[in-house]
Image (cartoon, rainbow, N blue to C red):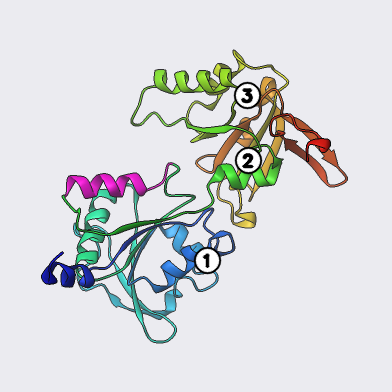
Amino acid sequence: MDGRDAATADAMGTLFVVGIGPGLPHAMTQRAKDVITTADCVIASNLYQEFLRRDGTLPPENTEVEAAPDGGTAAGAESGTVFERPGGTRQTLICSTMGKQVELAREAFQRVRAGEDVAHVSGGDPNVYGKSDLLYTMAEADEADDVPIEVVPGVTAALGGAANLGAPLSNDFCTVSLSDKWRGWDEIEEKLRAAAISGFVIVLYNCWRDYQRAIDVVREERAEDVPVGIFNDAGRGDAGRNLDDETHTITTLGEANDHNDEVGGMGTSILIGNHETTVWENDYGKHLVTPRGGRDVDDF
């Protein structure tokens, strides 16, 4: 790198793809919080903006200074707003919407090239059905190989929900998305069947799409009495959006399709145990436990 290239690199900002877990500040990593609070620009959905204002990770709405001079996204579809943070620094906030991810990625690239640090917020973990692949793919398509990208991990729903249920992921497990937006059901079914036959504990994402069909596939390869956990808005407490706040239900594979009322939408995941998963109960409730390799106390 010659002197001019080094100067250009020094003038660059960084694009951070930030996983915030369930979205509430208490469930974020300190790294995620630090990146968001110090970023020149934050791209986040209205819901995550609401969550991140709860403890000042984002500035309150009454600190608005002005509309962003460039109008927000490159396409001008969303209006960026400048807020004043404690200490007098200013931060631009841009609303992220599902239909504008391409434009938002280009907006982020432009801002980084102008020297800004940009925090592109992703629920859960950016690498688990999040936004990291989109931004790398867009960088490739737009020849944005000059833009530094850093992924900040977060707690994905499988881990948050498993914690509520006990210890169901202590052995091998996998996640399968039921979204057929970019792949056919034949591929989804093939993966489900392979996971079921292999003995993985399975966590289903995007359960509002054909979850009963997915359960039926697993039932062909797994016993009816295998424990199943259905959880909504894991880690969100009383801020849940699916049903009535954060919930979890323990049932069996044979009865999982009888729980339509517990499958509320995008915030629902379903954990399907394997032949080793058991329901363990103490004075405080029921829990799911999948032992690691069939160990007993003497093995410790």
Q: Is 3 located above or below residue 262 in the figure?
A: below
21 is within the stretch colored magenta: no
- Disc on res. 231: 2
Query: Amino acid under label 1?
Result: Gln
- Which three-letter amino acid code belongs to the residue tagged 3? Asn
Mark number for residue 193? none
Q: Earlier in the sequence, mark 1 or mark 3?
A: 1
Residue 109, image x, y percentages: 22, 59
Specify the amino acid type for callout 2: Phe
User: 172 or 255, which lies in front?
Assistant: 172
Earlier in the chain: of badge 2 and badge 3, it is: 2
Give me the residue at 83% from left, 36% from top.
Answer: 298
Say above or below: 78 vs 206: below
Q: Which of marks 1 and 2 is nearer the N terminus?
A: 1
Q: From the top left corner, tell me how far across and down residue 166 is, in percent.
A: 72, 43
Q: Where is residue 36 in the image (x, y as percent from the top left)?
A: 42, 67
Secondary structure character of the magenta stretch overall: helix
Residue corresponding to mark 1: 30
Residue drawn at point x = 59 percent, y = 52 percent: 240
Q: Which residue lies furthest to the bottom in this view?
A: 87
Q: Residues within 10 Å of mark 2 (few under 14, many from 20)?
A: many
Query: Could you classify mark 1 by the number of other residues whose Cα lies within 10 Å: few (under 14), some (14-19), or many (20 or more)?
Result: few
Q: Kindly report the distance in space between the C-alpha atoms of the residues bearing marks 1 and 2.
A: 25 Å
Say above or below: 183 vs 60: above
Contact between marks 2 and 3 (CB within 8 A): the answer is no
In the image: residue 155, left or right of residue 15: right
Q: Which residue is drawn at 59% across and 63% down?
A: 26
Magenta segment boundaries in residue numbering: 129-142
- Residue 119, percent across and down? 36, 63
Task: Give the CA distance from mark 2 to mark 3.
Answer: 14 Å
